[in-house]
Image (tube, rainbow, N blue to C red):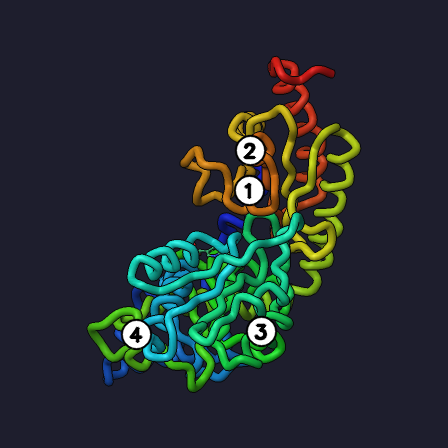
Amino acid sequence: MRRYYFDYAATAPADLEVVKAMEPYFYEKFGNPSSLHYFGQEARKAMEEARGELAAFLGAKDEEIIFTSGGTESDNFALNGIAQANENKGNHIITSAIEHHAVLEPARLLEKRGFKVTYVKVDEFGMVSPQDIKKAITDKTILISIMHANNEIGTIQPIKEIAAVAKEKGIYFHCDAVQTVGHMPTNVDDLGVDLLSLSAHKFYGPKGVGALYVRKGTKISPFMLGGGQEKHRRASTENVAAIVGLGKAVEICKKKMFEEEKEQTVMRDRIINELKKKIERIYLNGHPTRRLSNNVNFSVEYVEGESMLLNLDMAGIAASTGSACTSGDLEPSHVLLSIGRPHELCHGSIRFTLGRFTQGEDIDYLLEKFPEIVARLRSMSPLYDK
Ligand SMILES: *Cc1c(COP(=O)(O)O)cnc(C)c1O
């Protein structure tokens, strides 16, 4: 059966060019970048080239890039590292109610350890207000962490404005840009961020590798201890092949990003408009215009997200309900609850995310099958009274 992938926000397939670039670093060029001999230096050179590629892409300096195991580690690193290194200055952190769990969970743990955390609310579209951030600041605030774009509903935050508020008060600003790096501009100076998280598998690189950008002069504690790698900030032998893959993925995105953004916006809007026409009582989650070019998220009245997901899967369509990371539990998505959706609509959410390999005919198929599935499920629902 032909399969249709609409879950790029969960992960994207690696680009074949990325895989090819990685291959030699598993065997011929297998050296440890910390070794001083030929093998080590060959690996180090490749790793530093990838670092340079990423740094240039972000408008950063090479030494401001720390390679990590992915978005989750980068987020944990930012929160814990800043909290630990700046405890003497204050114990207050500001974030939003709709962050990824990789930010929310470390924030909760810090609360248990005596930090105070303000979870700023969002409006019905999932937007954080810079004004609310400003109001939440105290003289104990050491870090503000707001994501660039939300992984569930696609809303893009006013990062520049929020960063300006942070800067005015001399507070570090971290941005989880896992959903935007490689998809839209993420220049660290334009955004005004001090720390920024990214993950390669969200932009056609391999899984298990990412980076944390840390602006020069930022006081941050190391995340892992045990070796001198990454300037003593992240010990452990570097995943050279994966880092090379990340570099290649950046190089490709640099060329294709703007074109892809345009194409995906057209496809996204086609799905949104057609589904609204074909299915009654469905509600778009997230901002109508300030949203990721590849994100469609609807709440469908009288239907369970889980049922839609399984029926779509049987028809060969891969989608997501709530967040991919949380679809295993029964709690409704914290993001949908935060934008004020009632519980039934949280449970009836479905997300379609597009990417590099999505084609027009995939969308034709989706637009044919999904309304059928919703109609079938509704016909079985005792609550639905058409
Ligand atoms: C995917 C994702 C993460 C986690 O990244 P991993 O590399 O899978 O650990 C963090 N934040 C956001 C917004 C994401 O979409």
Horizontal and vertical percent position of residue 52: 48, 80
Horizontal and vertical percent position of residue 167: 55, 80
Q: Residue at x 62, y 67 (%)?
A: 130
Question: Which quadrant is home to the N terminus?
Answer: top right
Type of amino acid at the residue the image marks with label 1: Leu
225 above or below 284?
below
Type of amino acid at the residue the image marks with label 4: Pro
Taking depth in this image into account, of 149 and 19 the one nearest to the observer is: 149
Horizontal and vertical percent position of residue 291: 67, 54
Separation of residues labelled 1 and 3 (CA atoms): 26 Å
3 or 4: tag closer to the N-terminus: 3
Taking depth in this image into account, of 138 and 85 the one nearest to the observer is: 138
Question: Which quadrant is home to the C terminus?
Answer: top right
Q: Kindly identify which numbered label has been placed on residue 337.
A: 1
Separation of residues labelled 2 and 3 (CA atoms): 33 Å
Type of amino acid at the residue the image marks with label 3: Ala
The crowding category of the residue bearing disc 1, from other C-alpha atoms within 10 Å (few below 14, some 14 to 19, many at least 20), is some
Q: Which residue is mark 4?
A: 222
Q: Quadrant of residue 298?
A: top right
The crowding category of the residue bearing disc 2, from other C-alpha atoms within 10 Å (few below 14, some 14 to 19, many at least 20), is few
Q: Which residue is mark 3?
A: 163
Asked whether residue 30 appears in the rendered view, the answer is: no
Type of amino acid at the residue the image marks with label 2: His
Asked if disc 3 is less than 8 Å from ligand 1, the answer is no
Separation of residues labelled 4 and 2 (CA atoms): 40 Å
Taking depth in this image into account, of 264 and 194 the one nearest to the observer is: 194
Q: Residue at x 46, y 76 (%)?
A: 139
- Frontmost of labels 3 and 4 is 3
Separation of residues labelled 3 and 4 (CA atoms): 24 Å
The crowding category of the residue bearing disc 4, from other C-alpha atoms within 10 Å (few below 14, some 14 to 19, many at least 20), is some
Separation of residues labelled 1 and 4 (CA atoms): 35 Å
4 or 2: tag closer to the N-terminus: 4
